[in-house]
Image: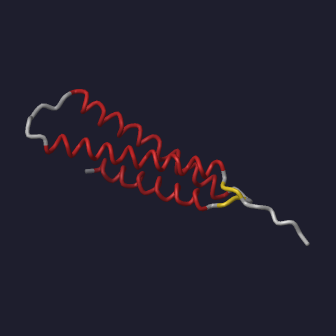
Amino acid sequence: MGTLLKKYHSIIGIGTFCIAIISISIAFKTTILDICRLLSSENTDSAKRIFALNYLSIIGMFINPIGTGLGIAAILEKGTKKSLAITGFVINTLITIFGFISCIK
């Protein structure tokens, strides 16, 4: 009988999935901050709120392509499970595409 090797998730795939989760949380925080800014009855846009919004957007713009590249590397890695790598790759790619589309306005 041949020995069956147990497949484990790729460490790169786990990293890609973590980056995707961080990207989703950044996207939600950015969206919530932007909605709060638009819906506030007072016309006082504090510099801290606008700085946080821009800072989170810039972080998201740089972290998503990195997650996409790591996702490709994790998918191409042999002998490991691919589910987290594929999920992270898809999420990072979608957020990257939507980010570029939103910049075009």
Q: Position of residue 8 (x, y in %)?
A: 70, 56
Residue at image coords 33%, 48%: 28
Q: Residue furthest top?
A: 47
Above or below 91: residue 51: above
Q: Quadrant of residue 82?
A: bottom right
Give the left or right position of residue 11, taking residue 95 as reference: right
Residue at image coords 74%, 59%: 79
Q: Position of residue 83 (x, y in %)?
A: 59, 62
Give the left or right position of residue 40, taking residue 86 as reference: left
Question: How many numbered discs, if any?
Answer: 0
Give the left or right position of residue 32, taking residue 55 as reference: left
Colour logic: secondary structure
Residue at image coords 30%, 51%: 102
Above or below 46: residue 16: below
Q: Quadrant of residue 74?
A: bottom right
Above or below 54: residue 66: below
- Foreground pick, 93 / 15: 15
Q: Position of residue 67 (x, y in %)?
A: 52, 48
Q: Position of residue 38 (x, y in %)?
A: 16, 44
Residue at image coords 47%, 42%: 63
- Foreground pick, 102 / 24: 24
Q: Residue furthest right?
A: 1
- Foreground pick, 102 / 20: 20
Placement of the N terminus among the 4 image quadrants: bottom right
